[in-house]
Amino acid sequence: MQTSSSRCSLAAAFGAVALMLGLGAEAHPRLAADRSAEVGLFQSDANAVNRITAFRVDRFVPVDDRHLVIWTRPNAAYLVTLRHPLVELRHARAIGMTSTAASIHRDFDHVVVNGMRHRMVGLHALDRAQARALTGRS
C-alpha cells in the first residue's frame, strides 16, 4: 500500500521523467568555472521570464557551474541560472527538466543532472546574438 508521501514522490518522479531527455551537451572550449561577470550582462529584468512553454528541450550548453543555455526551438534560447554551483554540469552528457502543466517555471521546476534535481532561480530569454556570445554557437 502506498502512503501519501510516496505517491507525491512517485508523481514528482514521473514529472521529471516526462521531460528527461537524452540531450547531448555541446563541447565548448571557453567553458570556465565561473563566468558570472559575462553572464550578468544578459540577466536584465527586461528579458527575465517566469515560465516558458516547452514540450521539449532541443539542446543545452553549459556556460559555467551555475548557468546553462537551453533551446526549446531553433531560435528560442534561454539562460537558466541554478541556485547553487554544480561542477557536474560542465561534464553532463544529458539533462532533464521537470515541468508543471507543460511549462517550465522559474523558482519551481528543476534541472536534473545525474539523477539529482537542482532548483532554477533565474530564467532569461536570449536572442540569437546573446546565445552565440555566451556559447559560441548559434
Image (cartoon, helix red, strand yellow):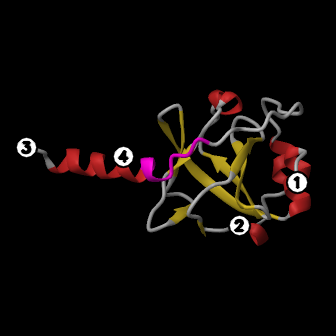
Q: Secondary structure at mark 1?
A: loop
Q: Position of residue 97 (x, y in %)?
A: 54, 50
Q: Residues within 10 Å of mark 3 (few under 14, many from 20)?
A: few
Q: CA distance from mark 4 to mark 2?
A: 28 Å
Q: Decide which of tag 3 and tag 1 comes sooner along the chain.
A: 3
Q: Decide which of tag 1 and tag 2 comes sooner along the chain.
A: 2
Residue ID for mark 1? 138
- Contact, CB < 8 Å: mark 3 with mark 4? no
111 over 73 or under it: above or below: above
Say what amino acid the circle numbered 2 marks.
Ala
Q: Secondary structure at mark 4?
A: helix
Q: Decide which of tag 3 and tag 4 comes sooner along the chain.
A: 3
Q: Position of residue 130 (x, y in %)?
A: 88, 58
Q: Nearer the viewer, residue 72 or 62?
A: 72
The answer to whether residue 39 shows anywhere in this view is yes
Q: CA distance from mark 3 to mark 2?
A: 44 Å
Q: Residues within 10 Å of mark 4 (few under 14, many from 20)?
A: few
Q: Nearer the viewer, residue 33 or 7?
A: 7
Q: Is residue 9 left or right of residue 131?
A: left
Residue ID for mark 3? 1
Q: Secondary structure at mark 3?
A: loop
Residue ID for mark 4? 13
Residue ID for mark 2? 48
Q: Nearer the viewer, residue 36 or 16?
A: 16
Q: Decide which of tag 3 and tag 2 comes sooner along the chain.
A: 3
Quarter holding the C terminus? bottom right
Q: Is residue 19 located in the magenta-colored stretch of the structure?
A: yes
Q: Decide which of tag 4 and tag 2 comes sooner along the chain.
A: 4
